[in-house]
Amino acid sequence: LFFSSFRLNVFAKDVKSLFEPLGYCREDFDVVFLASLDSFGSLRGEIAHTSARRTRKMLDQKTEVTTINQLLLGFTDFEKVIRSKKGI
């Protein structure tokens, strides 16, 4: 499973709308991961849509790298849930 978001944000509602019709229930989704996904998507959208020519809000590189690494771990954990349900 590979999630990619070059110009689009992926929010919890998107993950749920993609996987709930396939038989996954809300308990399959880690709430902390989904909240982090929403928070990251909102921040990214805020910066992307309010910074026409230059960034108005300075980001801390260390914090952003930590957040992205946590999200990647969340995607890995989510992939494990999907694989375990599919018997892969």
Image (spheres, rainbow, N blue to C red):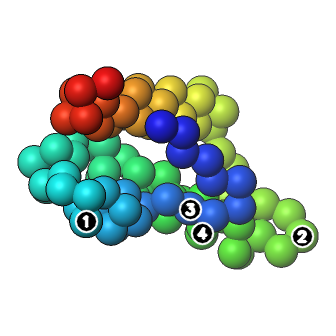
Point 13% across, 55% down: residue: 25
Most foreground residue, 55 or 31: 31
Q: Residue tagged by mark 3? A: 9
- Mark 1: few/some/many CA within 10 Å (<14, 14-19, 20+): few
Instruction: Point out residue 6 in the picture as x, y percentages from the top left corner.
Output: 71, 54
Report the amino acid beneath label 2. Answer: Arg
Q: Quadrant of residue 48?
A: bottom right
Report the amino acid beneath label 1. Answer: Pro
Instruction: Point out residue 80 in the picture as x, y percentages from the top left corner.
Output: 30, 27
Nearer the observer, disc 2 or disc 1?
1
Q: Residue tagged by mark 2? A: 53
- Mark 3: few/some/many CA within 10 Å (<14, 14-19, 20+): some
- Mark 2: few/some/many CA within 10 Å (<14, 14-19, 20+): few
Q: CA distance from mark 4 to mark 3?
A: 11 Å
Instruction: From this view, report whether residue 43 is shown above or below residue 61.
Output: below
Q: CA distance from mark 4 to mark 2?
A: 14 Å
Q: Residue tagged by mark 4? A: 46
Nearer the observer, disc 1 or disc 3?
1
